[in-house]
Amino acid sequence: MLPATLVFCFVIGVLVSRYIYRHLAAWQLYQRDWNDLLSKVQPISVAAVTAIGDEYLNPTPHQLGLEPVDIWHSLGGLEGIERIRRNARIMLALAAYAQRWNFTESIIVKERMRQDALHLQRATLQVILRTVFRTSRDTDVPPGRGVFYLHDSVGAYHLMTKRLLTLYRTSHAGLYPRLAEVLGDGLPLRTAEVGS
């Protein structure tokens, strides 16, 4: 009976520690300066995220789209997935920063982005777990349903980027160009191609 109690206490301790760590990390991000937040955004292939995210959010009649291997390599593999996770937290802090000049809209956008971030966190965790614990080492692409979670995570990230850029475009035109430069323009590729 004692070992089961110890295991239960250990698991509860880990979960509580993880919650406290996440809460403190988010609080520290929210206390940062806008330029400092932007400097923490890690580079992600904007073209890949836009193409994959737009395909995911706007389905076409032939929904085969990009091959999983191409998606995986264009994102940068497991390291790219980790960058997406970290950037999502920073984008939430950037949405919270917008409360200084547009309280009402930024609260709504931040809550929507928070829901997107939860979806992204669950999907990226599935991709990471399926990649690390895969049974076959023939390919570096997440096996089985991992490919679908890969689409979910990129779709959520793309949506978060679009929400944040739209908030800044309508609320603070002075900061928008720099944010768009760091995150990408967030426009779907089809729109950009038509406009060219």
Image (cartoon, grey):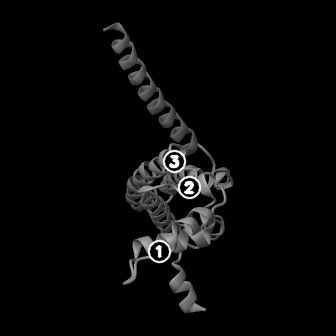
Q: Please give the name of the residue rendered at 66% of the width and 69% of the height, measured from the top-left corner.
A: 181
Q: Earlier in the sequence, mark 3 or mark 1?
A: 1
Residue 153 lies, with reference to residue 185, above or below; the image says: above
User: Judging from the image, what secondary structure is the residue with disc 3 in?
Assistant: helix
Quarter holding the C terminus? bottom right
Q: Please give the name of the residue rendered at 56% of the width and 91% of the height, measured from the top-left corner.
A: 195
Q: Which residue bears the numbered disc 1?
A: 54
Q: Which mark is residue 84?
A: 2
Between residues 182 and 30, which one lies in front from this camera angle?
A: 182
Q: Earlier in the sequence, mark 2 or mark 3?
A: 2
CA distance separating discs 3 and 1 = 23 Å
Q: Which mark is residue 128?
A: 3
Q: Amino acid at mark 2?
A: Ile
Q: Please give the name of the residue rendered at 50% of the width and 43% of the height, measured from the top-left corner.
A: 133
Q: Total of numbered circles in the picture? A: 3
Between residues 118 and 64, which one lies in front from this camera angle?
A: 64
Query: Residue 113, image x and y in percent?
Result: 43, 57
Q: Amino acid at mark 1?
A: Asp
Query: Residue 183, image x and y in percent?
Result: 61, 65
Residue 130 visible: yes
Query: Residue 12, image x and y in percent?
Result: 38, 23
Q: Residue furthest left?
A: 1
